[in-house]
Image (spheres, helix red, strand yellow):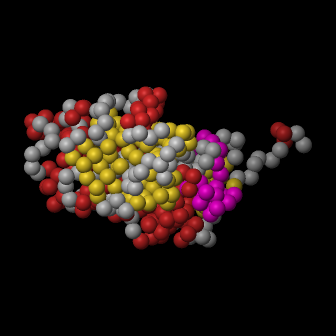
Amino acid sequence: MSASDSPPMRPNRADIVIVGGGLAGGLIALALARWQPQLHVELVDGGEHFGGNHVWSFFASDVSGDGAALLEPLIAARWDGYDVAFPAHSRTLATGYASLTGERLDAELRHVLGARGRTGVAVTGLTPTSVTLADGQQIEAAAVIDARGAGPEVAAYRGGWQKFVGQMLHLSAPHGLTRPIVMDATVEQIDGYRFVYVLPFGPDRLFVEDTYYSDTSDLDHGALAARIADYAAAKGWQIAAVEREESGVLPVVSGGDFDRAWPLQDAVARAGVRATLFHATTGYSLPQAVAVALAIARDPTPETLASRLRAMAADNWRRGGFYRLLDTMLFDAAEPDQRYRVLERFYRLSPGLIERFYAGKTGWRDRIRLLSGRPPVPITAAVRAILRGGSSDNL
């Protein structure tokens, strides 16, 4: 029989197919394996490894219960508190902090899923019930979840960008740090609000990230890598090797249109950043990723999966209105090299308020406190920014 006479390839079948094995997709797969083991779940990712080269961090106050249990196997390091440093203010906070790594996520997914987790697989098409791969193979499913990270929906946002380069450094001598430095804004303020983020993963290993809240998405990789080396040298840390590196450009959203970002007629279920499920100011997506994974594991009904996830995303967008207001003031009211003052003031507030802010649970009392007192930006500029930016925001 010639190739042209061969019968068509019989499609694979699954209960749920997740496309994208990063944080959001990986956590959904692990949650389903833990709480719905009878389901046949497929996870496909275009990269060589699940999770890529990423480090994801979270505060102990961000998750609890089943969410904390879901994350536990993925934690590479944890600490009892963290430090921040600004030109006129430094502080140690006692909130617990922990980090996950792409390596841990990859290992756990391969252990749990086995052959149902596939990497290096390019996807060329998605429908609510099928996935088409680059080799022509098709996977049919009761439901498909698109968790591939940021995509065309970013065109629906207004605001700025959080961009970064991070390196895992092996040092020639111990560094002496016992806690993370979540923000070191004592560095030169370049290209907007700049800070350095430092995680001590071992006595002679540090993850160091150079981060910017910038007006542009342009990322000069070489310049940021050089600044990491300069920062290490200024601290007296001699770099023996750069073990690995990551970079990223994330939206910091001050406004936009949710219905444009996820049109109602788009019936493919989404998760993670592609679903607008992230914190508008920090870009953090881990608390939302955990919440979505648990919600799907509790009710994986395929017929309503897309509508329920879109409802969760719409609720996250609505609750993010206050954070978008803060982003408007950060980007439109503060001069780029003075943006650090906004965060410097923020870190003078109570630990509980700071915890709730990062978890996306800022209540009305917190909002009053954040907006009261002497503003860190000119009040007239803040009012003008709000009036300019707020009129077309779809909440």
As drawn, is 372 to the left or to the right of 132? left
Residue at the (24%, 60%) spot, across then down: 351
x, y percentage for residue 121?
65, 45
Indicate whether residue 125 is drawn in magenta: yes
Residue at the (12%, 36%) spot, across then down: 378
As drawn, is 25 to the left or to the right of 364? right
| Relative vertical location of residue 21 with respect to residue 355 in this rendering, above or below | above
Camera sees residue 135: yes
Residue at the (83%, 44%) spot, across then down: 6
As drawn, is 196 to the left or to the right of 54? left
x, y percentage for residue 147?
50, 50
Specify the quadrant that holds the N terminus. Answer: top right
Q: Nearer the viewer, residue 392 or 195?
A: 195
| Relative vertical location of residue 105 with respect to residue 260 in this rendering, above or below | below
Residue placed furthest toward the right: 1
x, y percentage for residue 184?
32, 43
The total number of labels drawn is 0
Camera sees residue 269: no
Q: Nearer the viewer, residue 64 or 120?
A: 64
Q: Which quadrant would residue 235 be assigned to in this image? A: top left
x, y percentage for residue 61?
34, 63
Indicate whether residue 262 is drawn in magenta: no
User: Magenta residues?
Assistant: 105-130
